[in-house]
Amino acid sequence: MARNGAKGGGAVNLLAQPDGKSRLSLVGSVDLAHSEHLLSAMPKNFSAIDGIDVAEVHAIDSAGLAIIVWIKNQVRNAGGNAGISGVSDEVKSLSNIYGLDLVDASPLSLD
């Protein structure tokens, strides 16, 4: 399932894997300007998601970082544990500003 945004915008792709789990990929701009679209494109059931891929994120701000934290926590609240892969230097730098380790398996919080 692919739920794409406008050209240059953000997109959410949900890719089914042979084991029945799914990988959620964020693509493009994951930022305040695209946050409403990205959140509306999210799947309703987070329990089957076992990974979040951010390798194709080319623009991110604090709202985008909050979306990643929200997705990870939705998966955890649904009984899953999704790792985050493809963390670019830009995403890593922004997460470090907020004191987050996106590849850590523990629950994330912006507190």
Image: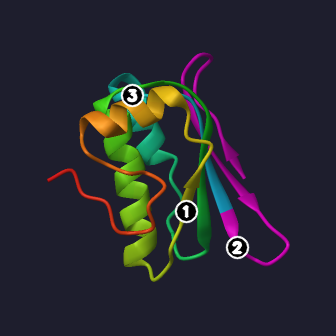
| Residue that numbered label 2 is attached to | 21
**Which comes sooner in the sequence, label 2 or label 1?**
2
- The front one of 11 and 21 is 21
Quarter holding residue 9: top right
Quarter of the image for residue 43 reads bottom right
Magenta range:
1-22
What's the CA distance linking mark 3 and mark 1? 21 Å
Instruction: Pick out the residue farthest to the left.
Output: 111
Magenta stretch holds residue 73: no
Identify residue for label 1: 83
Question: How packed is label 1: few (under 14 Cα within 10 Å), some, or many (20 or more)?
Answer: some
> Dot 2 surroundings within 10 Å: few (below 14), some, or many (20 or more)?
some
The amino acid on which the numbered mark 3 sits, given as a three-letter code, is Asp
Q: Amino acid at mark 2?
A: Lys
Side of 8 where 23 appears, left or right: right
User: In the structure shown, which secondary structural element does the residue marked by tag 1 occupy?
Assistant: strand
Label drawn at residue 31: 3
**Amino acid on which the number 1 mark rests in the picture:** Gly
The residue shown at (59%, 68%) is 49
Residue 30 picture location, percent across and down: 46, 31
How many discs appear? Answer: 3
Q: Estimate the x, y position of residue 39 in percent, counting from the top left.
A: 42, 46
Please tell me whether mark 2 or mark 1 is closer to you in this view: 1
Residue 48, compared with residue 9, is above or below; it is: below
* Label 2 – label 1 distance at C-alpha: 13 Å
